[in-house]
Image: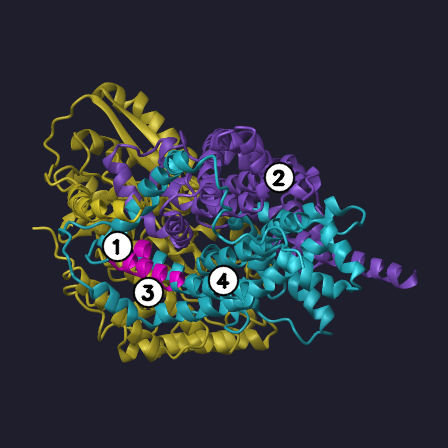
Chain colours: A yellow, B purple, C cyan
Amino acid sequence: MTMFRTRRPFAIVAPVVLALVAGACNGGGGAAATCDGEIDEGTLTMFAHEGSEADAYRAAIDGFNAGPGEELGVTVELTMIPEGQYTDQINAAAAAGDLPDVIDFDGPNMANLAWGGHLISIEDCISDELRGNVLPSLIEQGTYAGTLYSVGSFDSGLGLWAWRSALEEVDARIPSGPDDAWTAEELEGILGDLQEAGYEHPLDTKFWYGSQGEWFSYAFTPILWSAGTGLIDRDDYQSADGVLNADASVAALSTFQRWVDDGLIDADAADDSNFLQKESPISWVGHWMYGPYQEAAGDDLVLLPLPDFGNGSRTGMGSWAWGVTSAAADPDAAWAVIDYLMSDDVILAITEVNGAVPGTTSAIGQSPNHASGGDLELYVTQLEGAPDLAVPRPVTPAYPNMTQVFRGVIDDIVRGADPQQTLDEAVAAIDADIEDNEGYPPPE
Amino acid sequence: MTSSTRAHVLQYAAMLLLAAFFLFPLVYMYASSFKPDALVLSDADSFAGFLPTPFVGLENYADAIERASVFRSFLNSMIISGGIVVLGLVVNSLLGYTLARLRFRGRTLLLAAVIALIIVPFEALAVPLLYLSALFGWLDTYHVQILPFVANPLFIYLFYTFFLNVPAEIEEAARIDGAGPVRTFVSVVAPLARPAYATVAILGFLFSWGQFLWPVMVTRGIDVRPLALGIGTFKTTPPVQWGDIMAYGALMTLPLLVVFLLFQRYFVQGVASSGVKG
Amino acid sequence: MTTPVGSVAPAPPATGRGWRQGEARTAWLLSAPALLGLAAFVVAPFVLAVVFSFTNQRLISPLPTRFIGIDNYLSTFGDPAFWRGFVNNVIFVGIVVPVQTGLALFLAVLVNSKIRARVAFRTVYFLPVVTVMATAAVTWTLLLNPSGLVNAVMGVLSAGTFSPDWLGSTTYALPAIMLVSIWQGTGFQMIILLAALQDVPEELYEAAELDGAGAWRKFRSVTLPGIRNGLIFVVTVTTILAFRLFDQVWIMPQIPGGPLDATRTMMLHLVETGFGEQAIGRASAVAVIFFVLVLAVTLVQRRFIREEAGG
């Protein structure tokens, strides 16, 4: 009996297993459960990413268990999973039908999970009061196919940090807000002046975050939005043609490419020392660098909006958000936890650690940095202007693929590839994926 | 005399140069683990990269241990790797021996199939295995991280190659003494293949110690999470703490080093030194 | 000339008596655990993957899985990124296998000689092997930075003319990956060859010397045939593992496979398709194509090696 002869049974077994397995794993949870106002006692399971705010999360859940949880008879078992592979672990758990009751996830991944049937709508769970209190940007990020699936305790801020003194050195105008942001030409001029003044590569863009995964999409899609285009046609999310590879897109990214070629951008940097040591006095980065930058520049630090590539200054947004999974036996209990995580005290405890923008207007009011006159007021202005000022990354199940494609686009263009060709190829890849998935038909 | 001394000196020089090549990244890693984060990168362009100065003591290590629940995940890795190695040594050597020394119909085909299976990359199997594991309720356990890796085509092939080299005379002698295949294997042949066992033990340990993709897919909390996943704790939103990452890398490498140093003397034993004359 | 030990052809020696009857049964009994393991954890999932390759299976999807025939194969064959990966793999294998094997053999011979501190040297040469590749890759990335140590040394050696942006250059990125792979893999092959070297009986060398053979002649007619099986193993395995290149090209360049696909490999393509794009069906097709390709290469390799034995 040779080994090959025993292989034939597999050929019969395989399709059977496939059907079993695929049927079990595709489409998590058919029942469209939702909040009905009744909370059952019991234990909930929860995953959260273990990042810089991990301790704040743990403290918050302890607070819930001791406080509201105690009263309601609900206990939460929190499992922290390292941030580096968190999204992959969530996806694997979803694929295996193994999700807990409550999870957090990086905002743009929401649509993919919701489409797969792994999240339930929280429209009936969220109170009107909370809904009105939450930042418009978070509502934008959390809404897929007209239904709200997630809210976040915080949102992210993206802009240009600068050493004021360096700008004054070259007599650069200092914008006061998104409305009078520098145009791309103006910024190019300022960078040129800085270069002549001795700053060899004046603009820091953290290209070395590249392997971080989401940075290139997060940071540089605003260039396209600012040019009036974007990644995909947002009317029906079926095609990127005519948007991603529009003339305006090509022009804007060609300009960006020129900045790299002319040495205006510090493309070889491998750490933050260029801005910290005032070698690259302008830095295109998000809220997480406020702490270190503040420490280095003190009063000389100024926060400015991203440049205007023709259609107004635009910026990115979106960060970790909470959702109730379709595996939750009692969505109301799950929502009670999220509701607690959206309270001002918890939000402020978290944002104090990770420096992000608090997710509710009431919490913002209690944060000196973000309230009117604070250093980070610009972030709030932008987020409150969502989806016009701060634009959410496309809310579509196609996003995981789109971000992988766009990451390649930015890297290729920065390295000198022809923008039109690169964008055309990207469009082909994105459209092919959407077609392969039958246009990602929205639920119901 | 002079030419042989010169050859000697040349040989030493070559070996030292090569040793430097193989060592320097490791020295850099260990030195960096004792430095403050900011200097890890900036010292990377000079020989200061090899010096652990300014010395911050075990600060990075303490930080890494605390943030990444090192004790628990270390224990998990020991259990998982230990299981894979111990079971693997038995299971794989048996098949290797069978292929090398026993005659039976289908032997050649089986050998070819085993070698062919070396090609199959784990990445291709991950998702199907995930589905199957979910079906059998094996997720987030030790055995789901051990059993799939016990039978290893590469190691089977390695054992096969080593057992081929065992001279027929030794087996003949055992057979004449009346020993069956199993007795021959256990008491005579296996002890001669110590280099194979040592190599497979070390490599099996190394491979499973660094396993990343599979644990990501099948583990959730810290209960059975192995050491390799801890590095993700440091891949948070920047700033990146290079000192901690290097310390973590150093911590991960140490047990492997110990295992290697323990087993490495078995490499020298071959049939030639066991006193068998043809 | 005596037949060197170790050049045993694949079939085991006929003993003529003793075990013949129960040998087959014993064989299958002893092999059972391994065969069970291989069948359950390698063959079965691979067969499942093959089935998936004919479907549009997605990691997360509410749509039922459909059979789509050979569409996945067609789109993979028509994907320039896949072919770029294939070409890079071939180049990588073409250089790394001979260089790494040669270097490993050289080291094995050096370590096998009667010099002092050879255990120390042997340990040092094997150290990179016991370093987890993920950790080593991160370390090397820092060292290969344009202003890193590698360029510092290169600058000295080339009097300042040669210090490229290794991982940022389309010309030098793949060589950088090769360097790291050779750095890590050589020790493993060295150990195998070392064990093989030590199996070559002293008498053969003595006999050759009596015949008046010099060092090179001894190497060619005694050493090489004597370590035949070890060499075959090393070349076969290094080739296969080289085709499976993934960790380094995932971790080291600015984005995986960069810059401009200079370090793209077939395995990277598989992972990006399966986990990035979440297209499990198409990723499985890549896996099958990969398997068939490398199998073909391995078969061709073994044909060559066998033929030289018979001639």
Residue under mark 2: which chain is it in?
B
Task: Please rate how many residues cluster around mark 3, counting C-alpha atoms within 10 Å: few if below 14, some from 14 to 19, many from 20.
Answer: many
- Answer yes or no: is residue C127 visible: yes
What is the number of the mark on residue C50? 1
Element at label 4: helix
- Answer yes or no: is residue A282 visible: no
Marks 4 and 1 close (CB-CB < 8 Å): no
What is the number of the mark on residue B260? 2
Residue type, label 3: Val
Instruction: Identify the residue shown where x is 41% and y is 73%.
Output: A413
Residue type, label 1: Val
Residue type, label 2: Phe
Is C285 contained in the magenta span?
A: yes
- The mark closer to the camera, 3 or 1, is 1
Image location (x, y in percent) of residue C234: 55, 55
Res A151 quadrant in image: top left
Image location (x, y in percent) of residue A173: 46, 71
Residue type, label 4: Arg
Element at label 1: helix
